[in-house]
Image: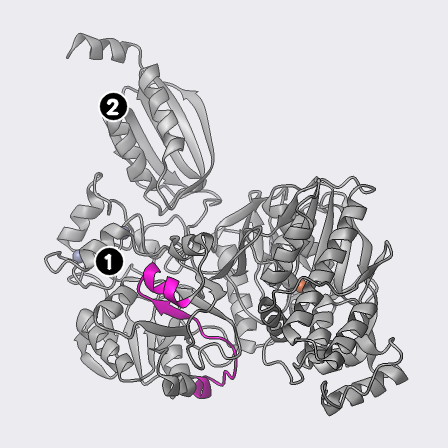
């Protein structure tokens, strides 16, 4: 032994590190092992119920270098929440080892989301000489499935849906080699030992051959169901209009836009106007669907829609399909009919997709839970998550001060749930609209699933729910837990932004604009401005001027019906059933209800105000999905280069839309271009909202302006607001981790609930 080494041993000290965060299933232990090797540190590393535990021994200089490197360059998929270090007794280890996972007490480790295939695995997949060439289940510690295969924590092979496939010699060698990137990659497999893909129409073909046949069917204009990471997709050639049409007919989806998949970023840039931010999102390991203005017309794919949702391949199967000559632009839409949840179990998929798909490409590895594709947009304040699922769920998105396990059950549309345990808020994947029986069942399953994963007894939960007494989620909350806390819908929207930022004490002006939510006074809210903080409570200080809503929430389906209510208080309007307006008979009927005060409700909904403007500008038919009329209005407006703003008024407590609506009617009668009027509507509303929040910020000592609610998925409105607020002395905060729509409600409920218990 060299003298220097002996001296180093003499000066040996030991430290214990506790690493918390997303640190299991991401190659963290191999990473620690390699670091220890580099810095000649002895000791061990282990996964346990709290994260990663490390015992490290070396001289002070080496130990310091090891400690620095630990936090500096962790594995790509990991997210370190904290590293705690404390002195430990020296045990004179002579090497560094990875120890097997113990069984933890309460697992508060953060399960990682599913990741797209990494460049190294992709290289092997497409290299004919590689032992895993063309094998669709190739993965390593840097990539592959996680959340969609895990059945219990800690995350180890027997706890995943890969348990039925024990590793062969070669796979095990890699799994056990500390320097290999498959070291402790739980789902590691190869064609010899692992599961296979098969085609329903020809059971003889497996893996590459089955995929090649599927690619051929797609080229021929057939519809193929493809099992992916979190469920089945329905795929077809996006440039064969008859096939796209057939897919719509067979799935009963009239207008809901389909997403498409293309081979790479170059192909994506052809299809959509993709900003640098949008491209970064599309290529991120989460591989979400990115929404952006379409540059190519694909008939029937997103009818009447100027935007297109595009994603890049994320499983080996997708890459193999393109390699095998699948059409260059593939429709890839959730395998279901209408708005049911995506199919993910093989028998269920076979039953539900029979008559829709001409063939099914079925992988044998079971999917532990349904995880849809995520949907994002690149906005002026950063990414806007429209649907948060694959690649993001179930990451913890916030730390909340709940001392007891807490479950927030969200709202009824775009439902997600949030479980708070050990102070970390885990937001579930997108569950869906609870009106659908299958989504209601998925809700129950997700409550059971998350509780079981984090070892929480559902009976021991504090349950936070929406104030709406008739929401299904409210009803369901009554059957779980021992204590229930109601939270008003729009306060939850504002709180979701503050929870993400860990700013529970920040005093803010919070704007919550959406379609509908149950207000404190039982009326239909949706255009609310609050002052206060999550900790001290949010007080409603302003709102959209009240309007009537004939038919209540049912008016959401018929923009002309909302228009009747919003126009009821305006005198001297022309006959809107004749040209150029040509509003349908439902308008006249709704006017009668509004005038008689029969089945008419009070609302402050900005969503319905957008519907009203859309109806006046030509969207006179019923909507076929939520938010459709507002999207239509935004897309018309984007075509305009005019800079005029419609006159909205602000009186210190209410935003008044009447003058703006009168101006829309006059402009249409004058024959102004629809796109210019639509643009003026956005600009006028944004300018007035900006004026309102800036005026309120001072007197309420606000540190920030918060924007949330489904209306803020409107990129044009956000851009206009960004411009109007560019000189604001206080920052503008929007959602970054959860959707501004009702998919983010559960996080806001959890934050407000945590401050109540
Ligand atoms: Zn990999
Ligand atoms: Zn193998
Ligand atoms: Fe909402």
Q: Residue at x 24, y 47 (%)?
A: 182
**Mark 2–mark 1 contact, CB under 8 Å?**
no
Left or right of 140 on screen, residue 742: right
Percent x, y of residue 363: 28, 70
Left or right of 635 on screen, residue 98: left
Q: Which residue is mark 1?
A: 138
Establish if 447 lies above or below 169: below
Q: Residue at x 66, y 43 (%)?
A: 731
Which label is found at residue 40?
2
Residue range corresponding to the magenta coloring: 248-271
Q: Quick one: SS at disc 2?
A: loop
Q: Nearer the viewer, residue 553 or 194?
A: 553
Q: Quick one: SS at disc 1?
A: loop
Number of residues whose C-alpha sits closer than 10 Å to that of mark 2, classed few (under 14), some (14–19) or many (20 or more):
some
Q: Nearer the viewer, residue 682 or 369?
A: 682
Q: Is residue 482 visible?
A: no
Establish if 174 lies above or below 543: above
Q: Nearer the viewer, residue 716 or 173?
A: 716
Percent x, y of residue 564: 79, 81
Percent x, y of residue 748: 65, 53
Q: Mark 1 vs ligand 1: CB under 8 Å?
A: yes
């Amino acid at each position: 032994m060299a003298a220097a080494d002996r001296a180093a041993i003499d000066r040996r000290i030991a430290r214990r590190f506790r690493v918390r965060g997303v640190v299991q299933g991401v190659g963290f232990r191999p990473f620690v092992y390699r670091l220890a090797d580099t810095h000649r540190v002895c000791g061990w590393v282990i996964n346990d119920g709290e994260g990663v535990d490390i015992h490290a021994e070396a001289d002070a200089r080496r130990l310091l270098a090891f400690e620095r490197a630990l936090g500096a360059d962790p594995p790509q998929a990991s997210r370190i929440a904290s590293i705690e270090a404390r002195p430990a007794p020296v045990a004179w280890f002579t090497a560094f080892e990875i120890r097997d996972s113990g069984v933890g007490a309460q697992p508060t480790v953060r399960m990682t989301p599913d990741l797209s295939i990494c460049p190294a695995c992709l290289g092997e997949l497409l290299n004919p000489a590689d032992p895993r060439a063309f094998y669709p289940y190739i993965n390593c510690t840097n990539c592959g499935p996680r959340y969609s295969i895990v059945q219990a924590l800690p995350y180890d092979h027997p706890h995943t849906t890969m348990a039925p496939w024990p590793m062969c010699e070669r796979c095990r060698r890699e799994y056990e080699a500390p320097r290999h990137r498959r070291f402790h990659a739980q789902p590691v497999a190869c064609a010899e030992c692992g599961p296979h893909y098969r085609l329903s129409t020809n059971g003889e073909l497996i893996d590459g051959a089955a995929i090649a046949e599927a690619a051929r069917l797609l080229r021929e204009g057939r519809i193929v169901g493809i099992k992916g990471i979190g469920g089945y997709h329905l795929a077809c050639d996006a440039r064969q209009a008859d096939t796209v049409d057939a897919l719509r007919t067979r799935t009963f989806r009239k207008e809901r836009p389909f997403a498409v998949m293309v081979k790479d970023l170059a192909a994506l840039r052809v299809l959509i106007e993709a900003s640098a931010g949008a491209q970064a999102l599309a290529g991120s390991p989460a591989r979400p669907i990115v929404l952006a203005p379409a540059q190519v017309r694909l008939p029937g794919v997103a009818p009447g829609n100027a935007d297109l949702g595009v994603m890049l391949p994320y499983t080996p199967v997708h890459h193999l399909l393109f390699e095998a000559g699948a059409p260059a632009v593939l429709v890839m839409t959730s395998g279901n009919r209408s708005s049911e949840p995506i199919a993910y179990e093989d028998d269920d998929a076979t039953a539900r997709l029979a008559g829709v798909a001409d063939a099914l490409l079925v992988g044998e590895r079971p999917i532990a839970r349904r995880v849809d594709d995520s949907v994002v947009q690149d906005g002026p304040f950063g990414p806007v998550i429209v649907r948060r699922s694959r690649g993001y769920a179930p990451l913890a998105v916030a730390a909340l001060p709940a001392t007891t396990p807490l479950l927030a059950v969200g709202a009824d549309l775009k439902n997600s749930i949030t479980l708070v345990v050990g102070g970390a808020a885990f937001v579930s994947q997108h569950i869906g609209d609870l009106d659908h029986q299958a989504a209601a069942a998925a809700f129950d399953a997700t409550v059971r699933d998350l509780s079981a994963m984090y070892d929480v007894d559902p009976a021991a939960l504090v349950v936070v729910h929406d104030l709406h007494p008739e929401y299904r989620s409210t009803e369901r909350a009554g059957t779980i837990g021992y204590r229930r806390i109601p939270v008003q819908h729009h306060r939850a929207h504002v709180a979701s932004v503050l929870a993400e930022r860990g700013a529970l004490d920040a005093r803010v002006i919070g704007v919550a604009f959406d379609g509908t939510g149950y207000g404190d006074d039982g009326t239909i809210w949706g255009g609310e401005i609050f002052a206060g903080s999550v900790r001290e409570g949010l007080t409603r200080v302003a709102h959209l001027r009240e309007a009537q809503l004939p038919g209540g929430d049912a008016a959401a389906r018929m923009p002309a019906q909302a228009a009747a209510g919003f126009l009821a208080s305006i005198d001297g309007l022309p006959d809107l059933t004749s040209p150029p307006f040509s509003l349908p008979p439902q308008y006249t009927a709704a006017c009668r209800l509004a005038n008689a005060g029969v089945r008419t409700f009070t609302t402050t909904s900005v969503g319905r105000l957008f519907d009203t403007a859309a109806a006046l500008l030509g969207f006179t038919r019923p909507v076929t999905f939520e938010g459709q009329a507002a999207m239509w209005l935004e897309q018309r407006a984007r075509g305009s280069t005019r800079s005029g703003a419609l006159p909205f008024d602000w009186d210190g407590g209410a935003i008044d839309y009447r003058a703006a609506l009168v101006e829309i009617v006059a402009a249409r009668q004058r024959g102004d271009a629809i796109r210019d009027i639509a643009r003026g509507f956005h600009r006028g509303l944004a300018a007035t909202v900006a004026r309102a929040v800036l005026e309120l910020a001072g007197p309420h000592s606000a540190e920030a302006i918060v924007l949330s609610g489904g209306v803020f998925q409107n990129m044009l409105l956000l851009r206009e607001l960004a411009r109007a607020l560019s000189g604001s002395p206080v920052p503008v905060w929007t959602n970054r981790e959860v959707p501004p729509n009702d998919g983010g409600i559960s996080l806001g409920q959890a934050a407000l609930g945590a401050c109540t218990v």
